[in-house]
């Protein structure tokens, strides 16, 4: 029992991830999102990718929301079918509302093509929330990648470097805030 308690305390004191990778699985899990997760993990960056960090029995929203709130940086991998997913838009909205640094990656899609559509299954308040988050992300400097013309290794290098730079900046800001406290 003591071992379980110590493990639980350690998990609560140390967030499960530094980086949350928000993506549309059907478009990106087996390519850019999965490859970026692997690269960051190999670099020692604790990353969250739903298919890699969740197990049967985990409560979807609870687990994902906790990972987002506990992360330092978000990577939003936008793709052609991204805006069709309630989960993607919910995760993006939570990243933005939590004031996380978000690195947009426009994978096979232009920012102007990303639009929240009203399919009559989502309350108007949620649609506004999603639209605001999407607009904020679209106007954040990010990376673009065309899988037919682009260099995969260059893209993964650029994306992982952007993540590392943002993590370092977040840590530096956090350190400055801690020094200012009385």
Image (spheres, helix red, strand yellow):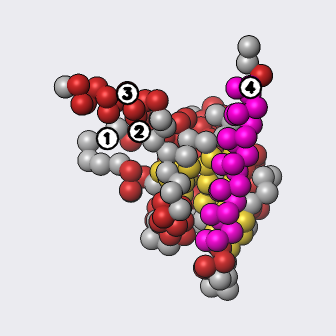
Q: Which residues are magenta?
A: 156-179
* Residue 173 belongs to magenta span: yes
Name which of mark 4 and mark 3 comes first in the sequence: 3
Q: Mark 2 or mark 3, which is nearer to you?
A: 3
Label 1 or label 4, whichever lies nearer to me, is 4
Secondary structure at numbered mark 1: loop
What is the crowding at mark 4: few (fewer than 14 residues within 10 Å), some, or many (at least 20)? few
Crowd band around label 3 with a 10 angstrom C-alpha radius: few (<14), some (14–19), many (20+): few
Separation of marks 1 and 3 at Cα, in angstroms: 19 Å
Query: Nearest the camera: 133 or 34?
Result: 34
Up-down relation of residue 159 to residue 127 (above or below): below
The residue beneath circle 3 is: 9
Residue tagged 1: 58
Circle on res. 179:
4
Q: Place residue 151 in its image quadrant.
A: bottom right
Report the predominant secondary structure element of the magenta stretch.
helix
């Amino acid at each position: 029992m003591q071992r379980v308690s110590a493990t639980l305390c350690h998990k609560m004191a140390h967030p499960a991830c530094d980086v949350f990778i928000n993506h549309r699985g059907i478009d990106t899990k087996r390519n850019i999102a999965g490859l970026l997760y692997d690269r960051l993990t190999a670099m020692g960056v604790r990353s969250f990718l739903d298919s890699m960090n969740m197990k049967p029995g985990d409560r979807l929203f609870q687990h994902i929301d906790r990972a987002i709130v506990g992360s330092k940086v978000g990577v939003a991998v936008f793709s052609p079918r991204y805006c069709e997913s309630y989960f993607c838009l919910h995760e993006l909205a939570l990243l933005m509302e939590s004031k996380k640094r978000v690195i947009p990656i426009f994978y096979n899609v232009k920012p102007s093509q990303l639009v929240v559509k009203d399919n009559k299954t989502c309350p108007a308040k949620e649609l506004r929330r999603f639209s605001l988050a999407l607009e904020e992300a679209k106007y954040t400097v990010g990376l673009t990648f065309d899988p037919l013309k682009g260099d995969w290794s260059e893209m993964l290098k650029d994306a992982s470097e952007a993540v590392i730079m943002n993590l370092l900046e977040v840590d530096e800001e956090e350190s400055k805030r801690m020094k200012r406290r009385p």
